[in-house]
Amino acid sequence: MEDELKIHVLFERGDMQAAATAAIDRYGPEVLGFLMSLLGDDRAGREVFSETCDNLWTSLAHFQWRCSMRTWFYGLARRAARRFQRAHRAQNGLPVRAFRGTQAIDYVVAPKADCHFQIDVEDRLRAIREALGTNDRALLMLRLDRGLAWEEIARIFSHGDASDETLRRVAIGLRKRFQGVRIKIRALACEAGLLSNGPCS
C-alpha cells in the first residue's frame, strides 16, 4: 500500500517519469515473471515486458486510478501478450510455445491427500498446462499465484473504461470460468494418473 501511495503522490505532482519508474521498480519483476510464465519463453517474455513498460510510460498521464497501479500494469501486460501471440501466429502460423508452469496447476492438483505421483510427474503436469488456453492460464496465475481479487482480475480482463456493472458481470463470469478450469485440471490430472480415488470418481 505504501508503494501505491508513493506512486500516486508522484503522479499527482505531475512527475510522470518518477511515477513510471517507481511503478516499474515495484511491480516490474512480478509482471515480467507473469509474462515469462504465460508465454513459456524468457526472450518472448522480456520482449513483451519491454512493450508493456513502453505502454505504461506513454499512457500513464491518462491513467484515472479506477484501480491500483499493480492491476493496471497487469492489464497492460496481458493485452501486450495477446498482441504478441496474434502477431506470432500470423507470422509463423504457430502458437507461442506453451508456458513452462505456474504454481497454480500444482495448487489445484497437489493438495489432495490421496494424490499418487509418478516419476514423470513434471511431464504430466506440463501436458496439463499445455492443454489450457492462454486466458485460462492467465486466470489461474492472477488468482492463485498473484492472489489478486476478482474485481482486479475483471479489470485486467476488461477494457480500461468498463463500467462498474460491466466489471461486476465480468468478475462473476471469471469466477465461474475459474471453477470450470479447476474441474478441467482435475479431470486431466485423473487421466494422467496424477490423482487416485476421491477426485477421480
Image (spheres, helix red, strand yellow):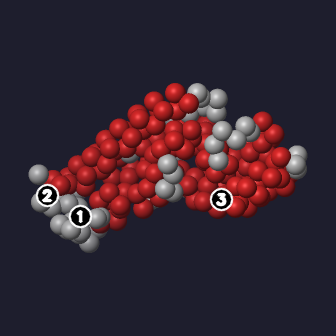
**Residue at image mark 3:** 1
The mark closer to the camera, 1 or 3, is: 3
Q: What amino acid is labelled 1 in the image?
A: Lys
Q: How far separated are the C-alphas under marks 2 and 1?
A: 9 Å
Q: Residue at x 58, y 27 (%)?
A: 163
Q: How far separated are the C-alphas under marks 3 and 2?
A: 41 Å
Q: What amino acid is labelled 2 in the image?
A: Gly
- Picture coordinates of residue 38, whole percent (x, y): 51, 51
- Say if mark 2 contacts mark 1, CB within 8 Å: yes
Q: Residues within 10 Å of mark 1 (few under 14, many from 20)?
A: few
Q: Residue at x 76, y 50 (%)?
A: 8
Whether 59 is drawn above or below 16: the answer is: above
**Residue at image mark 2:** 198
Q: Which label's residue is closer to the chain start, 1 or 3?
A: 3
- Say if mark 3 contacts mark 2, CB within 8 Å: no
- Picture coordinates of residue 198, whole percent (x, y): 14, 58
User: How many discs mark residues in the rendered view?
Assistant: 3
Q: Residue at x 25, y 52 (%)?
A: 186
- Picture coordinates of residue 120, whole percent (x, y): 29, 68
- Is 192 left, or right, of 95 in this rendering? left
Q: Which label's residue is closer to the chain start, 3 or 2?
A: 3
User: In front here: 53 or 14?
Assistant: 14
> Does residue 105 appear in the picture of this structure?
yes
Q: Residues within 10 Å of mark 2 (few under 14, many from 20)?
A: few
- Picture coordinates of residue 181, whole percent (x, y): 34, 44
> Does residue 44 appear in the picture of this structure?
no
The mark closer to the camera, 3 or 2, is: 3
The N terminus: image quadrant: bottom right
